[in-house]
Image (cartoon, coloured by chain):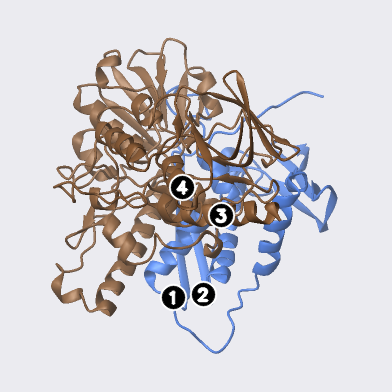
Chain colours: A blue, B brown
Amino acid sequence: MTITDRPVDNGVNVAALLGARDALSAAPEAAQFTWRASCTWRHGTHSHSNVSGFTGLGGEQQHRNTYEFDVDHPECFASEDNGATPVEFVLVGLVGCLTAGVAAVAQHRGIQLRSVNATIEGQMNILGILGADPDVRNGFEAITVRFAIDADASRDDIEALVAQSQKRSAVFDVVTNPTKVLVEVA
Amino acid sequence: METEAVVIGAGHAGLAMSRRLTERSIEHVVLERGEVANSWRTQRWPGLRLLTPNWQTRLPGCGYAGDDPDGFMPVADVVAVLRRYARHVGAPVRTGVTVRTVRTASRGFEVQANDEVLYARAVVLATGACALPAIPAVAGAIPPSIMTLSPLTYHDPGQLPDGGVLVVGASASGVQLAAEIHRSGRPVTLAVGEHVRLPRSYRGRDVFWWLEATGLLAERYDQIDDLIRARHLPSPQLSGTPEAPLTDLNSLTAQGVRIVGRLGRVADGVAQFSGSLANTCALADLKMNRFLNRVDDWADTSGHGDELPPAHRFAPTRVDPDTPLELDLTTGEITTVLWATGFRPDYSWLAVPIRDRVGHIRHDGGVVTDAPGLYVLGLPVLRTRASTYIHGAADDSDALAAHLHSFLCSRRR
């Protein structure tokens, strides 16, 4: 990496994150978070979800705003296409998580980022969700993420950034490892 | 009985400590549940050799004196070396003495062992880091028809039924046992989580020569950025066999071992593996190359670069893009699961409240600050990165014995 006079600033407060790590190691109950979203069916395959509150640091927390999301399917699925598909939300979640990780790790390692762009693709055979072939799974067969990063760093250092961001990514873990899921009827 | 110090465990750490206490004329006794080097006698498979070369296998006042300094000691030789060392230093070992409880008492500690009670002003816990296998909770979901064992109960492939073997964990034990079992004709699948890839040798020198020369093994615990991580790092993918220079995943793949991701869950008898294998391997390759860069830098700046074979890099770990994510354990294809998922110490007999919420002893480089007079020895990265290996006990025992000595002196006043 290049040493410059200007301090590295990717807009990530690493000191706060490291402070949180120390504080939460000492008070592990505050590290237990619950993330929430709620969803209302509109019409057809269209639904509307929002997120506003979550639990963590020993209490109830609020986002600055309520964030709203329309979820639907495209017209070729005989839907009205009022929003992205649920699987695209998964892709958005994964690539957003990895990109945040790249910025945070770069800040921690003293690497100034100039630009970070990523494309993500998930391959899926929809015979699975159509129930047409029992040997085809519903979910992605594979996901490919391609990062283009311009930074004051060698290619090895940039590859290490991307590798470390996967290692510490919640969504990467969610997608690559089994998770217990319980769906109930109220 | 009353004594100044009790050392629990007569392995390399306990014996090194005994020697350091004798040097300082501190009256003590070493309690050992079995014989000297008990774990090496009873809990190591006979094919195991030390990861460290013979020249490095040194104890306080006793270096390697054999005729094969670059070899790797088999378990039986380790036992012989420790027995000889115990006699050599006149360690006051009482064998066949199982410690039931250690608790604080009015003037130090009360140690209940067999049917007697000992009182000591200082106690050194040297029972080892590998007393119990660290087996993940997912083990409970393995179908009962499958034989399960750990490196502590594994002896040789002959004890396994015919059929496939799932080895979980790719540290030194995992890769060595995967290779040994696969050679016996039982097809091995190796589940690989976070691991440490290192070459057995590089530029003509053993990797432990480099770890020592570059100062890496001497890094102190209080200067390491992420100490928790350093203390929980899996052992490197090495084996103590000069004939097999690489025991990395590429060499296992070439032998026919099937590599899969970290074991995440077993649902209805089907093992599910993580899809993060490619990144796990990329991280290990990157980390190995950072170490090799450090080695090359050292060679250049120390002026030794010209005498050594040229720098090079090892092939990246090959990950099959079609690596399976599932393995059905109910078809009879897999008959054995071997948990090479690490080890943990056993302090179940310790009644002094010095353990953190996950059961680890809180200590400052082996000094248990919450219980003055109590020390722990023989744990990974206890005081330096060398603490993980046998020779690290030499410096660690010296530092802790000095602390213990001044502790006793301060109490006498």
Q: Amino acid at mark 3?
A: Gly
Q: CA distance from mark 3 to mark 2?
A: 33 Å
Q: Marks 1 and 4: in contact by CB < 8 Å?
A: no
Instruction: Single out the mark in the foreground, 3 or 4.
Output: 4
Which residue is drawn at the image coordinates 40% and 36% (left, top)?
Answer: B169
The answer to whether A51 is drawn above or below residue B99 in the figure is: below
Q: Residues within 10 Å of mark 1 (few under 14, many from 20)?
A: some
Q: Which residue is mark 3?
A: B365
Q: Are marks 3 and 4 on the same chain?
A: yes
In the image, taking residue A67 as reference, residue B264 lies left or right, namely left
Q: Label 4: state its secondary structure.
A: helix
Closest to the observer: B201 or B8? B8
Q: Where is mark 2, residue-wise?
A: A111
For numbered disc 2, what is the local secondary structure? loop
Which quadrant of the structure image shows residue A74? top right
Horizontally, residue B364 falls left or right of residue B47, namely right
The CA span between labels 4 and 1 is 54 Å
Residue A13 against residue A81 in the figure, above or below: below
The subunit carrying tag 4 is: B
Q: Nearer the viewer's eye, disc 3 or disc 2?
A: 3
